[in-house]
Image (tube, helix red, strand yellow):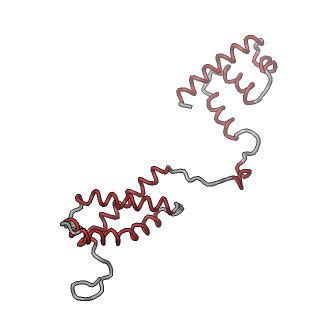
Amino acid sequence: MRDGKGAPKAQSDWSDMMRSALRGDAAAYKRLLTEMAPVLRGIVRARASGMDLDWCEDVVQDSLMAIHLKRGTWDPGQPLRPWVYAIVRHKIVDAFRRKGRAVHVPVDEFIDQFEAEPGTDPLENRDAETLIDRLPERDAALLRCLALEERGSEECGRRLGLAPGALRVALHRALKRLAVIRKEEGL
């Protein structure tokens, strides 16, 4: 293409083509869409690295369809490219939302690297201690003995001066109080 002075034009003026198309020039509209499609493909592929070509082409087609359907909302006094680029950006975001944030990567080859070391979570005891500290002293001492120190019920009963039946009742009550605290904390 050449500009009005006969010099080659670096980029065709999409705005002029859209203005002509809006006045009913079907050939200008066809030329506009033909020129627009490869540019949109480049934008989508650049912004959607890692997505397959079919996904990218779907976004391009969605963008072209949106441009077609919304062309009457474009202000002919404004440049067309920023309007088109905004539509494409929104269509890319919409497509990512539909796909979801998760990127699925096959992990069969290195699944064994994800296995956790056997044992307890190092923060588990700290978190349990924090909750237990909010209990009355006898309840806290009972739960520390049984759960955190992992001592038997006979030993804990002796340490706390509780008969086996009394220990079971005290444990039940302590666990109920702990459940209330956890519920209040939203845990």
Quarter assignment of residue 20 = bottom left
Residue nearest the observer in this picture, 155 or 2: 2
Residue nearest the observer in this picture, 67 or 104: 67
Residue nearest the observer in this picture, 173 or 116: 116
Up/down of 99 relative to 71, above or below: above
Residue drawn at (72%, 45%) of the image: 116
Up/down of 62 relative to 32, above or below: above
Residue nearest the observer in this picture, 24 or 57: 24
Up/down of 133 relative to 73, above or below: above
Along the horizontal axis of the image, is 148 left or right of 177? right
Quarter assignment of residue 8 = bottom left
Residue drawn at (71%, 55%) of the image: 109
Up/down of 4 relative to 94, above or below: below
Residue drawn at (41%, 62%) of the image: 60
Of all residues, the one furthest to the bottom in this rendering is: 6
Expressed as whole percent of the image width and height from the top left, the position of residue 154 reads 81, 18
Residue drawn at (47%, 65%) of the image: 45
Quadrant (top left/top right/bottom left/bottom right) for the N terminus: bottom left
Expressed as whole percent of the image width and height from the top left, the position of residue 17 reads 25, 71
